[in-house]
Image: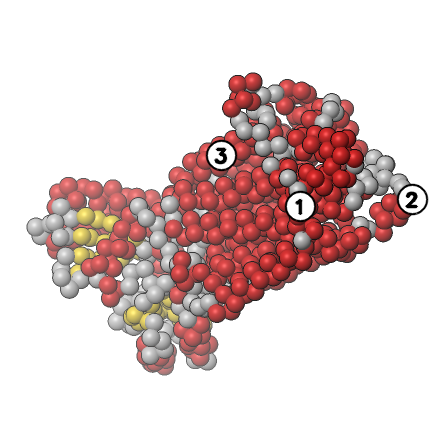
């Protein structure tokens, strides 16, 4: 592989104008696709195989006008002082608002008058209007949301406190500011790392081109492939992360080759042949991690993972072709002033030991202590992960300043916390001899469980399907509510055995519970798949068993530590005020598996780039200890810069008002921090120092079976050396490039 990539690097460097035109054309096509794409992206959400989803599908079939999975809103009213909402003036105002809502949007399915639906608190201080929509929250138009908000603002003039809850106002978080901050910090770090504006700008520009092509393509195909708006957001975040990393790796190696006195074209070839090999395999691990999200069997996650994997593939191709082409345009300016001055004086910029060299030597002197401190430190941080509770946040997790949170609190005070998460029980009586009796029995069973309220069964026109609304006593995300769902399902089994009627529990709260359970069940298989495939891939890269094993175990340690930190902050509330956590609760169920996928890819980037340098030095004759020092000498600065950039990008999301975005940003930032600086920079060199030559051991039979991909460039080095000896210097290398 190294030989092929070497030739590719030289070719793209020579034909840089042609390569640049190809990528410019692809960018233009993606731009046209982006500009002409439909603005209506799909945001359909389904969880195949769950009871809640089966209930939604059944209602869609038997009672389509009900829009069971449509968005909902609750306009909550609280009378001022000692007044009551049932007072003549307040009642007239609320009734008028009901009429306004009914005519406010074509997407509205039903508006329930609180005085007819008995949605008035016992003390008369609070009432709410229930609004149901024909489409999901993500498919609501801005005009529909605006009309809902305008009604709330208009109602405030009556003197009553009016707030709006439900998922109708839920929108995808805008992350533009965080991305801009992340790119700005990345630019600063790149300038400090390279000491050259040209080198920093080149790395950023190529990464942004890759992101633009990837996101443009995803947006253009969104309507055809039924992709949601979250797909482009994930692709942007991952594409930007790996795009900067890969360009950073190639440019850094190119500058190192120039510093050793090689011509520009030769340096580009060697940079792509060596660092490019690391980029290819690092990219493959990211693709495996993202494509592996399909094992969860949630269509939305599968599409998100595959689309983001496509963005990573584009980033790899950019790094292997456009980056060396851009290096050709940059010329000598790719080197900083100090490096150019050192070259003019024929001094090596690496003559003095750098920070990476000094740290590696320190670790080699005290490997046991470094390893123990690293492992025990992460182990202590990981302890809270044993108490991990997963769920989906409700409006109670919103900032107290939002209308959703205030509506949530008003409903809890006026009616009880269970009113914020009603359950919908669907009774399929088609196979029952007496459907009404069966539905009545279900209602009685639910009442005996112990809930706040049970609304009598309501049948569809055909009379074969009934719905029962159940109000739990506790808030939607509580353990008690989850137990109620399980108790109803258990009781439903008895009803089915006696009457033939099937009982299904659904609604937003039940859907969240089922989603969390599905994500929890998928976490271990996903980890096994991703880590297992990556282990095989890394075994090809490093020609070793212990090095990939160490890489996988180190990753698992950093992930568990990151989960521990997330539990401590967001579930227990430790340092919560520092990160703007206003309400503790269960950890978002999607977060652990999402974090595993993203961080695994980035962690393997750092592992491959850092350790392939060590492997390369070892193969070329250095002792195991010297190889570790050499790897850190050339790779530590680059890996540090890449990690700092990623931490900065992810930390930008911690400032979001959305609890979900805040949690994801925090988890990714701390996971990269632990993995890059504790695992890769401390534990990895300590373990390699303790293992010595055993680290690179591979059984002979396995060595014969595994294909030699030559990531460290051993074959390339031999061919270049032989070519130089027989053909005379650069002429032999040029001949190799034409092979």
Q: Which residue is mark 1?
A: 9
3 or 1: tag closer to the N-terminus: 1
Q: Position of residue 724 (x, y in %)?
A: 76, 34
Q: Nearer the viewer, mark 3 or mark 1?
A: 1
Q: Residue at x 74, y 43 (%)?
A: 266
Can residue 308 be seen here?
A: yes
Q: Is residue 199 left or right of residue 413?
A: right
What secondary structure is found at the residue carrying circle 2? loop
| 726 is higher (above) or lower (below) than 591 | above
1 or 2: tag closer to the N-terminus: 1
Q: Nearer the viewer, residue 538 or 576?
A: 538
Q: Is residue 582 left or right of residue 488?
A: right
Q: Nearer the viewer, mark 2 or mark 3?
A: 2
| 187 is higher (above) or lower (below) than 401 | above
2 or 3: tag closer to the N-terminus: 2
Q: Residue at x 89, y 40 (%)?
A: 347
Where on the picture, by quarter, is residue 81?
bottom left
Q: Position of residue 262 (x, y in %)?
A: 79, 42
Q: Which residue is mark 3?
A: 533
Q: Mark number for residue 345? A: 2
Q: Which image quarter is the N terminus in?
A: top right
Q: Position of residue 640 (x, y in %)?
A: 70, 43
Q: Residue at x 39, y 39 (%)?
A: 521
| 54 is higher (above) or lower (below) than 387 | below
Q: What's the distance in space between the residues labelled 1 and 2, CA to CA?
A: 28 Å
Q: Mark number for residue 500? A: none
């Amino acid at each position: 592989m190294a030989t092929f990539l070497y030739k590719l690097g030289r070719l793209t460097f020579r034909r840089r104008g042609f390569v640049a035109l190809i990528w410019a054309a692809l960018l233009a096509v993606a731009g046209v696709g982006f500009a002409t794409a439909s603005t209506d992206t799909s945001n359909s959400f389904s969880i195949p195989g769950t009871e809640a989803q089966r209930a939604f599908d059944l209602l869609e079939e038997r009672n389509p006008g009900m829009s069971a999975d449509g968005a909902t809103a609750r306009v909550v009213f609280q009378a001022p002082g000692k007044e009551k909402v049932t007072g003549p003036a307040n009642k007239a105002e609320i009734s008028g608002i009901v009429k306004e809502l009914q005519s406010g949007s074509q997407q509205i399915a039903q508006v329930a008058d609180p005085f007819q639906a008995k949605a008035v608190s016992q003390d008369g201080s609070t009432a709410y209007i229930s609004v149901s929509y024909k489409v999901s929250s993500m498919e609501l138009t801005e005009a529909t949301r605006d009309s809902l908000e305008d009604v709330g603002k208009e109602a405030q003039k009556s003197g009553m406190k009016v707030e709006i809850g439900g998922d109708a106002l839920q929108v995808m978080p805008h992350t533009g500011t965080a991305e801009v901050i992340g790119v700005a910090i990345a630019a600063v770090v790149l300038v400090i790392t390279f000491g050259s504006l040209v080198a920093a700008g080149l790395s950023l520009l190529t990464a942004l081109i890759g992101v633009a092509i990837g996101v443009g393509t995803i947006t253009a195909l969104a309507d055809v492939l039924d992709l949601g708006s979250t797909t482009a957001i994930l692709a942007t975040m991952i594409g930007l992360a790996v795009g900067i990393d890969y360009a950073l790796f190639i440019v850094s190696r190119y500058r190192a080759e120039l510093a050793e006195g090689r011509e520009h074209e030769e340096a580009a070839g060697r940079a792509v042949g060596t660092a490019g090999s690391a980029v290819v395999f690092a990219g493959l691990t990211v693709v495996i991690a993202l494509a592996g999200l399909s094992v969860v069997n949630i269509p939305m996650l599968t599409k998100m993972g595959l689309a983001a994997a496509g963005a990573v593939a584009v980033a790899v191709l950019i790094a292997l072709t456009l980056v060396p082409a851009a290096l050709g345009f940059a010329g000598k300016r790719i080197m900083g002033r100090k490096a150019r001055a050192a070259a003019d004086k024929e001094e090596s910029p690496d003559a003095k030991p750098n920070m990476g060299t000094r740290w590696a030597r320190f670790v080699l002197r005290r490997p046991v202590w470094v390893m123990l401190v690293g492992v025990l430190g992460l182990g202590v941080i990981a302890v809270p992960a044993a108490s991990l509770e997963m769920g989906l946040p409700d409006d109670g997790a919103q900032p107290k300043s939002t209308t959703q949170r205030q509506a949530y609190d008003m409903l809890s005070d006026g009616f009880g916390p269970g009113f914020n998460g009603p359950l919908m029980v669907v009774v399929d009586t088609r196979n029952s001899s007496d459907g009404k009796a069966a539905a009545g029995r279900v209602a009685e069973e639910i009442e005996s469980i112990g809930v706040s309220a049970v609304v009598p069964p309501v049948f569809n026109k055909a009379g074969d399907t009934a719905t029962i609304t159940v109000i739990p006593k506790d808030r939607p995300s509580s353990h008690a509510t989850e137990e109620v769902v399980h108790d109803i399902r258990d009781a439903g089994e008895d009803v089915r055995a006696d009457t033939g009627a099937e009982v299904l529990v659904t609604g937003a709260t039940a859907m969240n519970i089922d989603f969390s359970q599905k994500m929890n069940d998928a976490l271990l298989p996903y980890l096994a798949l991703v880590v297992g495939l990556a282990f095989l891939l890394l075994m090809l890269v490093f020609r070793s068993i212990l090095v990939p094993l160490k890489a996988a175990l180190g990753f698992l340690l950093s992930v568990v530590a990151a989960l521990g930190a997330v539990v401590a902050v967001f579930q227990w509330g430790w340092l919560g005020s520092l990160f703007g956590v206003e309400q503790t609760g269960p950890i978002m169920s999607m977060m652990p598996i999402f974090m595993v996928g993203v961080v695994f890819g980035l962690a393997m980037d750092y592992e491959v780039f850092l350790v392939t340098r060590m492997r390369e030095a070892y193969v070329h004759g250095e002792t195991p200890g010297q190889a570790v020092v050499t790897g850190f000498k050339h790779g530590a600065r680059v890996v540090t810069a890449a990690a700092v950039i990623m931490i900065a990008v992810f930390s930008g999301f911690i400032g979001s008002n959305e609890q979900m975005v805040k949690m994801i940003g925090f988890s990714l930032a701390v996971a990269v921090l632990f993995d890059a600086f504790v695992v890769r920079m401390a534990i990895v060199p300590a373990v390699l120092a303790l293992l010595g030559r055993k680290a690179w051991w591979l059984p002979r039979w396995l060595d014969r079976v595994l294909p030699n991909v030559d990531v460290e460039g051993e074959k390339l080095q031999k061919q270049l050396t032989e070519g130089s000896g027989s053909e005379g210097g650069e002429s032999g290398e040029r001949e190799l490039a034409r092979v």
